[in-house]
Image (cartoon, helix red, strand yellow):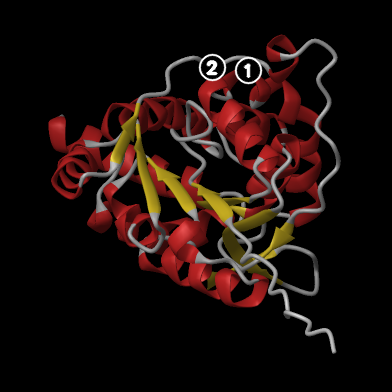
Amino acid sequence: MLGFVEKHPSPRTAAFFDLDKTVIAKSSTLTFSKSFYQGGLINRRAVLRTAYAQFVFLAGGADHDQMERMRQYLSALCKGWNVRQVKEIVAETLHDLIDPIIYDEAASLIEEHHTAGRDVVIVSTSGAEVVEPIGELLGADRVVATRMVVGDDGCFTGEVEYYAYGPTKAEAVRELAASEGYDLSRCYAYSDSATDIPMLESVGHPHAVNPDRALRREAVARGWAVLDFHRPVRLKQRLPGFSVPPRPALVAMAAVGAAAATAGLVWYASRRRAATA
């Protein structure tokens, strides 16, 4: 009598990418500030402040306390924004604003992970209304982003439903691993910020990308790989005729709306300017 050996499928794996300064060269939401101004969502003064905030963000980012104050402030600016209008603005300007600032190295990594059969998951503190379209542009399989509560009138209420930041990102990664069957010991993660250490240490292959000082120290101490991305390039310039196959982005967690990073960093910029005046 022949015996049959039961075959168990290999565990699934994934690569988790922070977005800002990891996959793209700037803050995803701050990049849309001029478009939000043209759409009447923010005033000219806010546009000027976001330009300064983008500089501050690129120079050194924001630590935990600053990010927490940002989270508390952002709801006031977002309240009353029409969600459909925000999505339309992002859709209309996505390729012009985001495509040119995608790191060539990150795009190559995403392709390599897909070729190896891994899911690609974007995990970002920026708002879902911004992150989801970017995830689709990149061909991501999953998206974890910040989201605000939307009222019956289709506008942000100012209440935070979920904030994708710090330990919360790590929780989202673990929940996705449980629901999708990922073997985290074989998964990869990439981020530029020390605030994402919980996410990085939750996988077997953590990578610090363009790391801030705190993350660089931690990466060196723990023997994590350190990568430097510095070549933003349009996807179509990388591969002539390039077209990202449609991949339905699955939002794993809820979180703050499209103005999250803008509101917080505008506030942070004004605080820095006041302090140095």
Q: Is residue 40 visible?
A: no
Helix, strand or loop under label 2:
loop
Helix, strand or loop under label 1:
helix
Q: Quadrant of residue 73?
A: bottom left
Quarter of the image for the C terminus: give it.
top left
Q: Using residue 159 as the reference point, say whether residue 143 is left or right of it.
A: right
Q: Amino acid at mark 2?
A: Pro
Q: Are marks 1 and 2 in contact (CB under 8 Å)?
A: yes
Residue at horizontal 80 percent and vertical 10 percent from the top: 240
For the residue pair 214 and 203, the one nearer the viewer reads as 203
Q: Earlier in the sequence, mark 1 or mark 2?
A: 1
> From mark 1 to mark 2, how far is it between C-alphas?
6 Å
Q: Reply above or below: 75 against 97.
A: below
Q: Reply above or below: 136 against 103.
A: below
Q: Residue furthest front?
A: 1
**Mark 1, residues whose alpha carbon is within 10 Å: few (<14), some, or many (≥20)?**
some
Q: Using residue 104 as the reference point, say whether residue 201 is left or right of it.
A: left
Residue at horizontal 68 percent and vertical 56 percent from the top: 142
Residue placed under numbered mark 2 in the picture: 232
Residue placed under numbered mark 1 in the picture: 100
